[in-house]
Image (cartoon, helix red, strand yellow):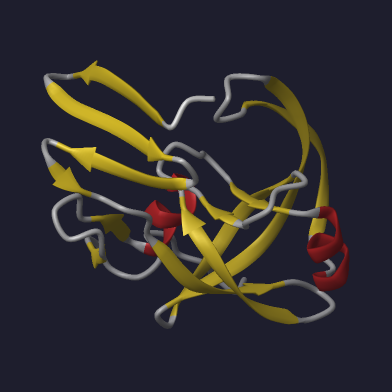
């Protein structure tokens, strides 16, 4: 049994290391302790809304929710399935839905992948839609653009 696993990657001359001490996991970016970044996210669907604590995953393209939450909120199913690569590098396929998310009173449309996951994920497209980024030094969400980055017109 391994008690300490270390993975070091070189990516665009930045050093990223993930160190697991038994079940405790920390991420370091250029020597800075990143930890995990979470956000309280309101997910809006046809049947209702729900506040979820989501792990912000900048390695994920989509918001990821389990089938029960998708059904409960009445998210809009698209005819599409997407191929995804999981964190352990396994390939999978997921149904794609449309919904809205809200973080810090910023609201916008997102694609949601259906996947049995222990923690809901907030992916990079949602962050960009809402005008946020994760600051690697502080581990906090920062506003980088006006709300939404999209415009909806009533015609």
Q: Is residue 42 left or right of residue 67?
A: left
Q: Which quarter of the figure is the N terminus placed in?
A: top right
Q: Residue 108 in the image: x percent, y percent?
A: 52, 66
- Quarter of the image where one finds residue 67: bottom right
Along the line of sight, the residue nearer the viewer: 61 or 30 = 30
Q: Residue at x 39, y 41 (%)?
A: 21
- Quarter of the image where one finds residue 36: bottom left
Q: Residue at x 19, y 38 (%)?
A: 29
Along the line of sight, the residue nearer the viewer: 70 or 66 = 66
Q: Is residue 139 left or right of residue 114?
A: left
Q: Which quarter of the figure is the C terminus placed in?
A: bottom right
Q: Residue 45 in the image: x percent, y percent?
A: 75, 72
Q: Residue 129 in the image: x percent, y percent?
A: 43, 57
Position of residue 55 relative to residue 60, above or below, is below
Along the line of sight, the residue nearer the viewer: 68 or 62 = 68
Q: Residue at x 17, y 60 (%)?
A: 138
Q: Residue 131 in the image: x percent, y percent?
A: 33, 61
């Amino acid at each position: 049994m391994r008690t300490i696993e270390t993975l070091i990657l070189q990516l665009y001359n930045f050093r990223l290391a993930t160190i697991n001490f038994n079940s405790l996991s920390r991420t370091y970016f250029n020597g800075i302790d990143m930890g995990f970044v979470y956000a309280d996210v309101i997910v809006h669907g046809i049947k209702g809304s729900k506040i979820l604590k989501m792990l912000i995953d900048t390695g994920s393209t989509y918001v990821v929710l389990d089938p029960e939450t998708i059904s409960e909120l009445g998210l809009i199913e698209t005819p599409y399935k997407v191929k995804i690569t999981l964190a352990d590098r396994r390939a999978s396929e997921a149904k794609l839905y449309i919904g809205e998310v809200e973080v810090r009173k910023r609201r916008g449309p997102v694609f949601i992948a259906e996947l049995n996951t222990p923690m809901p994920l907030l992916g990079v497209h949602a962050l960009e839609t809402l005008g946020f980024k994760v600051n690697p030094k502080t581990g906090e969400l920062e506003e980088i653009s006006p709300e939404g980055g999209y415009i909806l017109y009533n015609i």
